[in-house]
Image (tube, grey):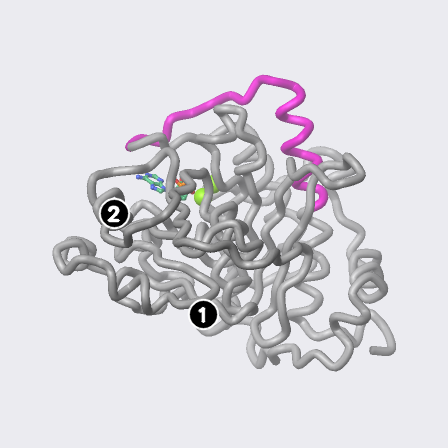
Amino acid sequence: MSSASDMPLLTRLIASGLSVSEKSAKCVQRIFQNGNLKIEDKGGLKNYQTIADRKIEQLLVGNIEKHFPGIAIVGEEGEVGKIELAEDWIDYQDSLSEFNSKFASEMAGAKIPEIVDPKDIVLWLDPLDGTAEFIDGLLEHVTTLIGIAYQGRPIAGIINQPFYKNSDNSLGRSIWGIVGVGAFGFQRKDKLPGRILTTSRSHMDETVKACIEAMEPTQILRMGGAGNKVLQLIENNAHAYIFASPGCKKWDTCAPEAILLALGGKLVDVHGNELLYHKDVQQPNKGGVIAAVEDVDFYLSKIPQAIKDKLNP
Ligand code: AMP
Ligand code: MG
Ligand code: MG
């Protein structure tokens, strides 16, 4: 690649998305230190919003629409772009050059999916995934999700984990992937024995429990966030993510699904259907979420018919 301006649209979206993620991570770290989360109840089961959810979405939308005008964006909180601090603007050209130098070897020879019409792109944003855990101080469960869908299916995604503790004691990391290219920013450990399932900590109900039990797990990891649970899969801390409930939305699954697909994994509903991400699609994942890097069909085969009948997509 000779210069940043030759970069394909998708690569520019990822490069600037990674730069925006660093800004959003600083934003949520700042808000947590400040201590006043300004919690609002959106109604239903542990369905909260804090000032971090609102501010991060404003920061993401503000930066993205400046550099990618006309690309459709759907964010969980329905916020408009608004940058309040000068330090929250990304330097677009720098983000492209930084990406090119940092990921030169990953991108060498990579077949980046071609975007024929940018109108076919939808960005699905979850400014803070795992808000209930953020409020409870379980900071490592919290992520910011930037999913990129093209013609209704995920093609790339970023999961930023702002409170991840790096080995040098710095805070925060970004995991990203492009379907057909690969996923980066994490270490995949050796596979653990047994059948370790990860599921919700804050949004459990009888159907979710019954579905998990039908799979005869050797261990259950109850954790916050769809992003965080997919991180458990890609790092090999868990074998499958099981959530037989209609509570998860498209902004929760788009970026994690793209990263799973980039690794050869799958994220589907309890019927085995692929999820669709067009702009005007029904936002709740009414058929539930079943995800794994390997053997998704095995987990699907264990779901009782009564549970499948309950979750109409
Ligand atoms: P969890 O695994 O409980 O963290 O849920 C994953 C994502 O789905 C989070 O963004 C939750 O806010 C959302 N979610 C799951 N169940 C519900 C629910 N019953 N009501 C509202 N949001 C939900
Ligand atoms: Mg979420
Ligand atoms: Mg959220």
Q: Which residues are magenta?
A: 22-44
Residue at 30 percent across and 32 percent down: it is: 45
* Quarter of the image where one finds residue 283: bottom left
Residue at 67 percent across and 30 percent down: it is: 29
* Quarter of the image where one finds residue 86: top right
Within 10 Å of disc 2 (Cα), the crowding (few <14, some 14-19, many 20+) is few
Within 10 Å of disc 1 (Cα), the crowding (few <14, some 14-19, many 20+) is some
Residue 171 position within the rendered picture, expressed as x and y whole percent measured from the top left? 72, 37
- Asked if residue 73 can be seen in this view, the reply is no
> Which residue is the site of mark 1?
153
> Which residue is the site of mark 2?
213
Above or below, 88 relative to 118 = above
Mark found first going from the N terminus, 1 or 2: 1
Residue 194 position within the rendered picture, expressed as x and y whole percent measured from the top left? 41, 54
* Quarter of the image where one finds residue 10: bottom right
Residue 53 position within the rendered picture, expressed as x and y whole percent measured from the top left? 53, 35
Q: Amino acid at mark 2?
A: Glu
Q: Please, which residue is most extreme toward the front here?
A: 193
Is residue 14 highlighted in magenta? no
Quadrant of ligand 2: it is: top left
Which secondary structure lies at badge 2? helix
